[in-house]
Image (tube, rainbow, N blue to C red):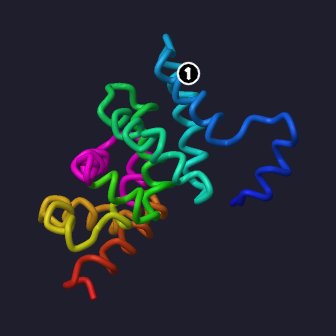
Amino acid sequence: MFTNSQRQEERIGKYGTPRVQYLQELVAQFQNATTEESKERIVANLANFAYDPYNYTFLRQLNVLELFLDCITEPNEKLIEFGAGGICNSCVDPANAAVIIKCDGVPLLIQCLSSPVKNTVNYALGALYYLCNTSTKEAILRPEVVDLIRKYAAAGAVSISFSNLARSFLDKHVPENH
């Protein structure tokens, strides 16, 4: 559920932790985590917070978007999945998208299209849908990327979510698809 300042104040009460402080604590926990499971749990939690526009400024302020991108470069498939999920959840916001693009997130998301994890592919497709614009389309709409997205669009019998998301991407961003 989306929130606002008044609703947030009601939820945390007089002695609760403000959202930015809570997110900062999660980032610190991630940085100090000693096990992969702890890191996975924390990144999944941060990715859930990335869904709510109320948190977008905090995510930028605390460099959480960069943390998500770092997770995509890890060998751990769960960290990649949750990092891609956080990017997907937050990139609809133009300011977040600008950070992701500036930090070379587009090539990382393109790599995620080849992931063996279905959620990671879905998150990458969704993120690329929102990140594709005049400044990024040359990188995103390369023939090999479009061919892969076309394969996902044709895979309706295997995965309807891949197919629908890929078709939406092609309809919006690939002119010869119209």
For the C terminus, which image quadrant?
Answer: bottom left
User: Residue at horizontal 29%, vertical 68%?
Assistant: 132
In the image, the segment drawn in magenta is: 102-127
In this view, the residue farthest toward the bottom is 178
> Which one is in front, 147 or 16?
16
Look at the numbered disc 1 and give the secondary structure of its residue: helix
Residue 140 against residue 120 in the figure, above or below: below
Q: Position of residue 104 (x, y in %)?
A: 23, 48
Residue at 51% x, 24% y is: 30
Q: 56 and 127: which one is in front?
A: 56
Report the magenta stretch's main SS. helix
* 120 on left or right of 37: left
In this picture, residue 6 sits left or right of residue 39: right
- Magenta residue check for 111: yes
State whether residue 40 is above or below residue 154.
above
Q: Quadrant of the N terminus?
A: bottom right
At 28% from the left edge and 76% from the top edge, which residue is drawn?
A: 173
Residue under numbered circle 1 = 29
Tell me if residue 99 is in the magenta stretch.
no
The quarter holding residue 13 reads top right
- Along the line of sight, which residue is nearer the eye, 17 or 140? 17
Find residue 160 and report its horizontal and vertical position in percent. Answer: 48, 64
The quadrant holding residue 81 is: top left
Amino acid type shown at disc 1: Gln
**Can you give x and y, in whole percent of width and height, for residue 144 in the image?**
14, 59
